[in-house]
Image (spheres, rainbow, N blue to C red):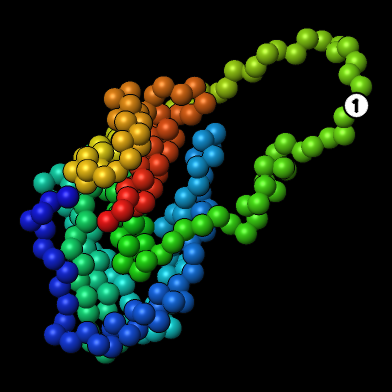
Amino acid sequence: MDDTQPSVLMSESIGSICKALVGAQADVGTALMNQKNSHFKSQYADLSAVLEVSKPALAKHGLALTQFPGEAEGRVTMTTMLIHESGEWILLPPASIPLAAQTAHGFGSAISYLRRYTTQAALGISVGLSDDDDGNEATAQAPKKAPKKRVAPKKATPAFEPKEEKVDDPILLKSELSVLKDLIDAAEENGNVDAKAIDLAKNVLEKGGKGDRDRSALEFTSAAIDYLESAIKDTPK
C-alpha cells in the first residue's frame, strides 16, 4: 500500500453518523456466496450479493454509501463516502487496482471489483455459505446408490473423458493477474502473512494462471486471489 495516501476524512461532528453505523452494522446480514469457480469449488459473494445485504441496513439507519470511480496513472480508483441524513459524513481513502486495458470491459471489471471490496470493508460485511450449502448440492451432483452386483459391461469405459478446453478472456485474465501481483506485494510488505499462501500465489503468477488441467487460467488465478486475500485477512494485526 502507498503510505502517502490520505487518511480518513470526516465532517466536523460525527456523533449521529457513528450511532447510525453501529446500528447498521448490527443489522447488516451476511453476504451469501452466490458465485463459484467451477472445478475449484471456491465460492464468493459478488457485488449484487453485497449490496443486497447492505442497502436495507443503511436505509433503516438513515445512511447512504456513495462511490466515485476514477482513473489515474494506469490504475482504476474508487473513493467511498458514507453520508448520514443529519449531514454528517465520512470519506474513506481511495482504493485502486491496475487497469489491464483501456477498454470498457477492463474498466467495468475493475470498478465492480473495487466496489465489492470497499463496500465490505466500509460496513464490516462478512460472507458466508448459502443456507443450502450443507452438502445437498454435492449430493445432487453425485447421488449415492445402493450397491449392486457388478456385471460385465457391454463395452469398455474409457479411463477418463477429455474435458472441453475453456478459452479465457485475455483482458480479464491480465487484470486478475495484476490484482494477484498487488496482493503478493502487500502480503510481503506485511511480513506476517503465511509464507505458504504467498508461495502458492507466486507460482500461479509465474505460470500466468496455467498449471492445473482441471481449471482454466482465469479460474486458477481467481482462486489464488481468494486464498491469498483470506490469508491476509487472517493475519494477526
Residue 23: which quarter of the image?
bottom left
Q: Is residue 181 visible?
A: yes
The residue that appears at 36% across and 80% down in the rendered structure is 22
The residue that appears at 28% across and 83% down in the rendered structure is 17
Extreme left residue here? Answer: 4
In the visual, does 2 lie left or right of 82? left
Under tag 1, what secondary structure?
A: loop
For disc 1, the neighbor class at 10 Å (few under 14, some 14 to 19, many from 20) is few
Q: Looking at the image, how many numbered discs can be counted on the residues?
A: 1
Where residue 139 sits: x, y (%)? 72, 42
Q: What is the quadrant of the C terminus in the image?
A: bottom left
Residue 92: which quarter of the image?
bottom left
The residue that appears at 32% across and 62% down in the rendered structure is 121
Placement of 206 over or under 132, stated as above or below? above
Q: Which residue is mark 1?
A: 148
In the visual, does 95 lie left or right of 199? left
Residue 210: which quarter of the image?
top left
Q: Is residue 222 visible?
A: no
Placement of 166 over or under 58, stated as above or below? above
Where residue 125 sits: x, y (%)? 41, 64
Where residue 189 sits: x, y (%)? 18, 43
Placement of 165 over or under 235, stated as above or below? above
Kind of residue sitting beneath label 1? Lys
In the visual, does 133 lie left or right of 30? right
Front in this rendered view, residue 7 or 157: 7
Front in this rendered view, residue 121 or 168: 121
Front in this rendered view, residue 79 or 10: 10
Front in this rendered view, residue 236 or 149: 236
The residue that appears at 15% across and 44% down in the rendered structure is 74
Where residue 119 sits: x, y (%)? 34, 63
